Image (spheres, helix red, strand yellow):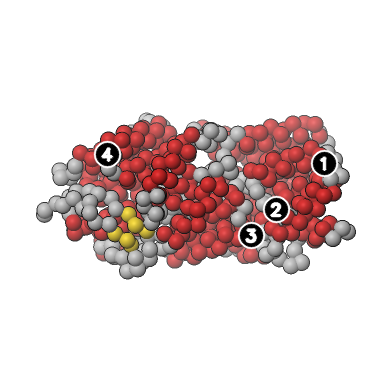
């Protein structure tokens, strides 16, 4: 078969895009995407006849629709078995979401198998061999080389590839994504994120319909200090690739960081529906977690409760080894535990939180969520002995994560057990010790960033510090902590309410009225008559 460089062909993926081969459909029980996926062109040596299907696979890859991307790449291979880069695309899809944490042995084995097939394609160009060599380091020797070491080496190789082939925009885009993958959550200079964003913003000016650019810009700015910079990309991504469930969800990462709650709700309603249609339960749960979080900030509690009633059935459909959608199984199980925990804690329903049924999930960080909610609920309900039992489980889960070298999640669970122990101490009358422990937990949480798997901490530690200071009648100190929380988590209901109460008790009536007015505005779409806190705010505004 004659091979042609397809550099002059660009495809826009519209309704009735090409259907994957029957063989690939048998392998992955997903419908073929039939809507806009954006505009992507990846120059390669595959035959001209498969150019459209290959570029379609890359568009799907950029929106983290991995099962559909594999189908597209297999479709290309059916018509051009020597297409080396289709094997590269399958390997990238097997790696999956770069922000998803550890990979299963099955995914690593499947990725290596795809790479070996790609290396066996004799017609591959030197550039394509570099692509295959770069992605190979993510999979090779996984049993002996730590994942972070492998991702750092992949980042280095993609940087070299992008520099070597300056005419290749896809190399630059994927290098930027690699920088995001290796960014440390403790690096408050955001060096990797800013370097990635600079690459992506420059490229976006020349490729405004490219799905990966808006997607990765949102990821690059997905921290409180940078999130406002992503608003343009967030409001454009879903329009560029509305057929992709993750393109519908991803803007809510930015909307959550800036407190644009209704925009987050609307985009996640669409994302959850698309994920449901694609039979992607983890992706659906991930969207529902962000959606529920926004419902609770706006006091749409009845809508949030309806979500809690369906999560168990959705989670039962999660398949651990499927290449699937953007949200891996860990995100699904995290959301399964987080949604009911948030529903109780965001409403200060401490008895409900203490009565949550413990969940056993395949992931310690997800299992920990329910025990954290139970411990906090019990401690704040006046039952420190019951809370202590859940803290013991949190310590065990933290130790498990430490032994697995999962430093990030071990740290997050460690913060949770410290928070719970602080409230146990307060319930036992050890006020000074409780405040010291709570402040230490808040400082630890501020020193890192939330995971992309979550819209935010199950209950922010510094916000809890403010609540504890109110409990011990130190309103001026509490106001300081709440104001710090509001900078990091703007328009959070509990943060604004706590600040309003603290200002009122500290004697700053004007600030209290202003904050209560903001609370009423945030709750504008909330249930009627709504939470007692909203009624309190309305009364304060009237001067009652």
Label 1 vs label 3, nearer the camera:
1
On screen, 208 above or below 529?
above
First in residue order: circle 1 vs circle 3: 3
Residue 377 vs residue 408: left or right?
A: right
Q: Nearer the viewer, mark 2 or mark 4?
A: 4
**Image depth: mark 4 or mark 1 in front:** 4
Q: CA distance from mark 2 to mark 3?
A: 10 Å
Q: Could you tell whether 129 is left or right of 102 in the image?
A: left
How far across and down, in percent of the image, does residue 87 sit?
26, 48
Q: Residues within 10 Å of mark 2 (few under 14, many from 20)?
A: many
Which residue matches tag 1?
A: 475
Q: For mark 1, does the 10 Å Cα neighbourhood hold few (<14), some (14 to 19), or many (20 or more) residues? A: many
Q: Quadrant of the N terminus?
A: bottom left
Residue farthest to the front, as pictured: 205
Residue occupied by mark 4: 165
**Element type where label 2 sits in the image:** helix
**Disc 2 to disc 4, how far (Cα)?**
49 Å
Earlier-in-chain disc, 2 versus 3: 3
User: Who's the residue at 68% across and 45% down the image?
Assistant: 486
For the residues marked 4 and 1, what is the alpha-carbon distance in whole angstroms?
60 Å
Q: Which residue is found at the position 60% from the left and 50% from the top?
A: 258
Circle nearer the N terminus (4, 1)? 4
Q: Earlier in the sequence, mark 1 or mark 2?
A: 1
* Label 4 or label 3, whichever comes before in sequence order: 4
Viewer-nearest residue: 93 or 463? 463
Question: Residue 83, percent across and down?
Answer: 20, 50
Which residue is disc 3 drawn over?
295
């Amino acid at each position: 078969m004659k091979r042609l460089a397809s550099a002059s062909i660009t495809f826009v993926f519209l309704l009735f895009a090409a259907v994957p081969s029957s063989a690939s459909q048998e392998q992955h029980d997903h419908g073929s995407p039939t809507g806009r996926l954006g505009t992507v062109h990846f120059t390669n040596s595959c035959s001209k006849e498969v150019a459209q299907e290959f570029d379609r696979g890359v568009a799907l890859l950029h929106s983290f629709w991995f099962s559909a991307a594999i189908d597209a790449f297999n479709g290309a291979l059916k018509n051009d078995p020597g297409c080396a880069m289709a094997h590269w695309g399958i390997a990238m899809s097997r790696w999956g979401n770069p922000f998803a944490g550890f990979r299963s042995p099955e995914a690593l084995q499947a990725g290596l198998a795809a790479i070996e097939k790609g290396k066996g394609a004799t017609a591959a160009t030197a550039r394509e061999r570099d692509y295959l060599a770069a992605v190979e380091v993510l999979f090779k020797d996984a049993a002996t080389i730590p994942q972070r070491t492998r991702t750092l080496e992949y980042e280095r190789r993609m940087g070299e590839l992008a520099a070597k082939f300056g005419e290749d925009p896809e190399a630059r885009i994927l290098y930027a994504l690699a920088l995001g993958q290796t960014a440390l959550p403790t690096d408050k200079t955001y060096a990797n994120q800013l370097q990635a964003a600079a690459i992506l913003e420059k490229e976006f000016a020349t490729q405004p319909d490219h799905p990966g650019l808006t997607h990765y810009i949102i990821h690059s700015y997905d921290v409180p200090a940078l999130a406002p910079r992503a608003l343009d990309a967030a409001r454009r991504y879903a329009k560029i690739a509305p057929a992709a469930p993750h393109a519908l969800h991803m803007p809510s990462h930015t909307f959550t960081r800036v407190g644009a709650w209704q925009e987050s709700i609307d985009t996640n309603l669409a994302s959850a529906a698309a994920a449901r249609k694609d039979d992607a339960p983890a992706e659906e749960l991930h969207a529902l977690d962000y959606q529920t979080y926004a419902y609770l900030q706006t006091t749409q509690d009845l809508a949030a409760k309806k979500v809690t009633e369906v999560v168990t059935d959705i989670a039962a459909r999660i398949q651990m080894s499927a290449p699937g959608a953007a949200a891996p199984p860990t995100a699904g199980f995290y959301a399964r535990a987080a949604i009911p925990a948030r529903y109780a804690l965001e409403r200060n329903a401490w008895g409900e939180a203490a009565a949550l049924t413990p969940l056993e999930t395949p992931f310690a960080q997800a299992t920990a969520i329910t025990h954290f909610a139970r411990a906090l609920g019990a401690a704040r309900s006046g039952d420190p002995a019951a809370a202590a039992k859940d803290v013991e489980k949190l310590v065990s889960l933290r130790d498990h994560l430490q032994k697995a070298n999962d430093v990030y999640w071990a740290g997050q669970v460690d913060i949770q057990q410290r928070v719970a122990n602080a409230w146990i101490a307060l319930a036992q009358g050890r006020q000074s010790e409780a405040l010291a422990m709570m402040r230490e937990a808040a400082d630890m949480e501020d020193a890192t960033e939330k995971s992309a798997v979550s819209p935010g901490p199950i209950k922010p530690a510094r916000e809890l510090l403010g609540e504890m200071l109110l409990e011990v009648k130190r309103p001026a100190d509490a106001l300081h902590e709440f104001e710090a929380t509001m900078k990091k988590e703007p328009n959070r209901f509990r943060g604004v309410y706590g600040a309003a109460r603290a200002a009122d008790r500290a004697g700053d009536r004007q600030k209290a009225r202003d904050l209560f007015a903001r609370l009423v505005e945030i709750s504008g779409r909330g249930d009627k008559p709504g939470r007692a806190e909203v009624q309190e705010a309305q009364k304060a505004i009237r001067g009652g």
